[in-house]
Amino acid sequence: MAGRRNNNEGALGSHKRSDGRWEVRVSLPDGKRKSFYGKTKDEANKKMKQALRDIDAGLPVITDKQSVGQFLEEWLVGVKPQIGIGTWVHYRGYVYHHVLPVLGRVPLIKLTPQQVQSFYAKRIDAGLKSSTTSNIHKMLHRAFNDALQFGVVQRNVLDLVKAPRRVYREMTTLTEEQVRRFLAGVAGDRFEALYVLALTTGMREGELLGLRWQDVNLEQATLVVSVAAHMVEGRVFLAETKTAYSRRRIALSRSAIDALRRHWVCQESERLNAIAWDNSLGLVFPDSIGGLVRASTLSSWMFKRHLKRLDLPDIRFHDLCHTAATVLLSRGCILRL
């Protein structure tokens, strides 16, 4: 059985480069030659010796050429087919808006737990939500796990970092009386049926905006959730829901069925009178020409406008889902208009 290699075995020589750094060249077991650099000859030799020890231990030879930013940009491309499009969009935003400006230039193998911990603290001090910071931590942990499997690093530095404490926002819901007032206030609105569905089914915003008439069966009083609307780089599109829980069949209440029947009649009239109408998607809640509506347009403009007009609490659109669960479903109440 062969013994351990001498730390200088394989060394081909060293010299000082024109840029002032020292270079030590070594011949690897596979016949390839590799250079290690340092500000001093000792530093370059230290890197070379560490690489040879790693080879003896069966570890990959790690260099400091790749930065955190370079790795994450490549990782985003590779991970895209593995996750839902919504998750990928969030990952991309976390990388480009938060991680790269602060840690992007740090050599991947030199990133320390202290640097990551400081990054989290500064982001939170700058006003970033604790939930977003927590999600960034989860993303980085996944990315560095992949880096470990790829042999790009020898450890997952995120294993040594404490996840930011997540502060949960108190859930706000409408009372049953406020729900009735809201629905009465949006009667006749172009998206009245959407609000009825949100409050009687608990469907999410993207699911409602991506709902197609082919997924609705008014005779059987059911609808199927299989796709949702997403926005990437300013473009809205439909994509399949990513989990088994998200893909589901929902029973419709009488109020929802009645609202959808009225909505279909109004939409047909609108379609026939439109100069141009996109029939390709067959959306239940399209924009004025049959296309997808941006979630920000619905929640930040239309929905908020109704709340203000009706003097109701300034809740998020997502809180309608909680309202359906806590106020209506928990009490077995079905609103009838």
Image (cartoon, grey):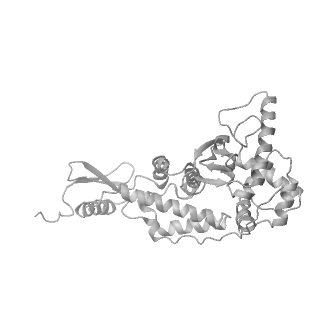
Can residue 330 be seen from the camera position used here? Answer: yes
Q: Residue at x 18, y 59 (%)?
A: 9
Mark count: 0
Measured from the top left, where is residue 30 in percent x and y?
A: 21, 50
Image quadrant occupied by the N terminus: bottom left
- Is 212 or 237 nearer to us in this picture? 212
Measured from the top left, where is residue 243 in percent x and y?
A: 54, 55
Measured from the top left, where is residue 121 in percent x and y?
A: 60, 69
User: Is 37 positioned to the left or the right of 67 in the image?
Assistant: left
User: Is 192 positioned to the left or the right of 326 in the image?
Assistant: right
Residue farthest along the front direction in this orientation: 219
User: Is 261 positioned to the left or the right of 19 in the image?
Assistant: right
Image quadrant occupied by the C terminus: bottom right
236 shown above or below 163? above
Can residue 317 be seen from the camera position used here? Answer: no
User: Is 325 positioned to the left or the right of 310 in the image?
Assistant: left
Residue farthest along the top direction in this orientation: 275
Q: Residue at x 32, y 55 (%)?
A: 36
193 shown above or below 44? above
